[in-house]
Amino acid sequence: MKTQIYPTELQGGRLLIAALFLALANFMVVLDMTIANVSLTHISGGLAVSSSQGTWIITSYAVAEAICVPLTGWLAGRFGAVRTFIICLIGFTTFSVLCGLSNSLAMLVICRIGQGFFGGPIMPLSQTLLMRIFPQDQHPKAMAIWSLTTVIGPILGPILGGTISDNWSWHWIFFINLPIGLLCAAGIWHFLRVAETQIAKLQIDVIGLTLLILWIGALQLMLDLGHEHDWFNSNLICGLAGFAIVGFITFCIWELTEENPVVDLRIFRHIGFSSAVFALAFGFAAFFGCIVIIPQWLQSNLSYTASWAGYVTATMGFGSILMSPIVAKWSAKYDPRKIAFFGLIWLGAVTLMRAFWTNEADFWVVALPQFLQGFGVPMFFIPLSNLALASVLPQEIASAAGLMSFLRTMAGAIGASVAVTIWDDHAILAHSEIVSRLNPELTLNNLIQQGFNQETALGVINDIVTKEAVTVAADHVFLIFVFLFLLAGFLVWLAPKPKNVKLPEGASH
């Protein structure tokens, strides 16, 4: 679609109101990516499931979104961008209400998948429609509106999620989408019908899409169920792993030979794109894994409420807001590889600070790395996005942007699953190691003298050991993420120095 052609009916106040509705819809979807993170303890307790099972609530949404993002262009071309956007908004809102009404983990995960499927196209379409309704010379203003909601969403998500879960109920983190979704759908239909795009009967790669869903679904089930089924000692996990590998290989062969693939893998022939995207994926996996673990550790070991865990997590937003416009200017002037490398090393150093956390850590000890992390996120995210899209041909930009978004989202989902699994496994190992070196007689006698019976005293000692083991395990996971950030940093240098590092106009990142 041609973003240069904008509807003259939308001017002045009508244009501003239409833009605000698009920005609000984008904000709602971005908010939902992080609002559940600090509420996992409440949700897991309410549904009587373990914290590792509760992670499905996050990963199911991310995987469904990743599957649907590559379909955005086809859906907009087949049904119209505005019509597709409104249908996705209504679907997202409906499944949000169903999430709030869920009384079992299975129902909640299914509804989160529905949320992800309908929420996936909303982010890229909101950006596309903003570019469409604003004149060419006002595109920077349109992108400023879009970027602001994209940055603020992850900041407010943990705060709102924690506050709502502590003071009302976790169900309301989903119910709040109902008035926003209905308002945005009605407003966009009223103001943006004049901006509808042309439709055509486009073919879709049904086989490619089916293979994509199957191998990603098998991979995610393997990651989420592996811990509970003792990994490859289970026939189920072995079967899922085999299915994921065969499905992935078949998918790659099909997409490389299909004339109109759902995911254009041929773009990976560009070394600059490949290295930038894989560096972004590794970095985002480590980044998202930290976001999932930190709130749970704060609540389980430091007795933080969900609200305070949200405040700690959200402190990274201040640095991100401050640095985003600065990094955007730097990326147009300096070698983006240097900026991205420095950003990833910065994130690795910040994560190394977390690897020395103890159960005696105060608020500022845990908040400082979060605050510093905010400065590093734009320094790796923006330059790598620009570098990736500057490395492909002009006609490949739309497919490259979709593929980059897909890999980033999948990396986040896999990072979250792997992080929680390693955390749980290392906690068990650390617990055994601490117990083997423990000499509890003196402590046991002291507790008995204070009035505890032997069984209660042993329980107190076990609780202390468990908390220490959980913290040791979390520190181990952070060390793994440090090496992941370093790996991503060195991958950046595989890309050749770009001749033009500016982001191609109209591209989504």
Image (cartoon, grey):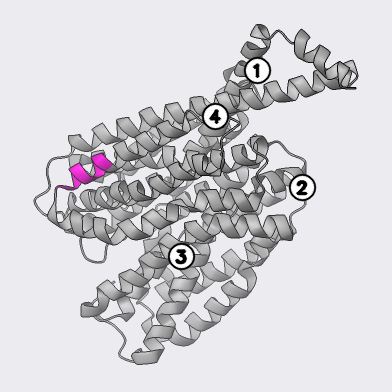
Residue type marked 3: Ile
Q: Quadrant of residue 51?
A: top right
x and y percentages locating residue 310 in the rendered image? 57, 52
> In whole angstroms, how far apart are the C-alphas of marks 2 and 4?
24 Å
Can residue 44 be seen by looking at this rendering? yes
Q: Is residue 111 above or below residue 22?
A: above
Disc 4 is placed on an element classified as helix
Give the foreground label among 2 and 4: 4
Residues at badges 2 and 3 in contact (C-beta under 8 Å)?
A: no
How packed is label 2: few (under 14 Cα within 10 Å), some, or many (20 or more)? some
Instruction: Work out which quarter of the rendered image holds the N terminus and state it.
Output: bottom left
- Left or right of residue 233, residue 260 in this image: left
Q: Is residue 454 above or below residue 220?
A: above
**Disc 3 target residue:** 122
Q: Which callout, 2 or 1, points at the residue further toward the start of the chain?
A: 2
Q: Quadrant of residue 503?
A: bottom left
Disc 3 is placed on an element classified as helix
The residues colored magenta run 335-342
x and y percentages locating residue 370 in the rendered image? 45, 45
**Disc 4 target residue:** 474
Instruction: Work out which quarter of the rendered image holds the C terminus and state it.
Output: bottom left
Residue type marked 1: His
Residue 46's disc is: 2
Residues at badges 2 and 1 in contact (C-beta under 8 Å)?
A: no
Q: Which callout, 4 or 3, points at the residue further toward the start of the chain?
A: 3
> In whole angstroms, how far apart are the C-alphas of marks 1 and 4?
13 Å
> In whole angstroms, how far apart are the C-alphas of marks 2 and 1?
27 Å
x and y percentages locating residue 267 in the rendered image? 24, 46
**Disc 1 target residue:** 431
Q: Which callout, 1 or 4, points at the residue further toward the start of the chain?
A: 1
Give the foreground label among 2 and 3: 2
Disc 2 is placed on an element classified as helix
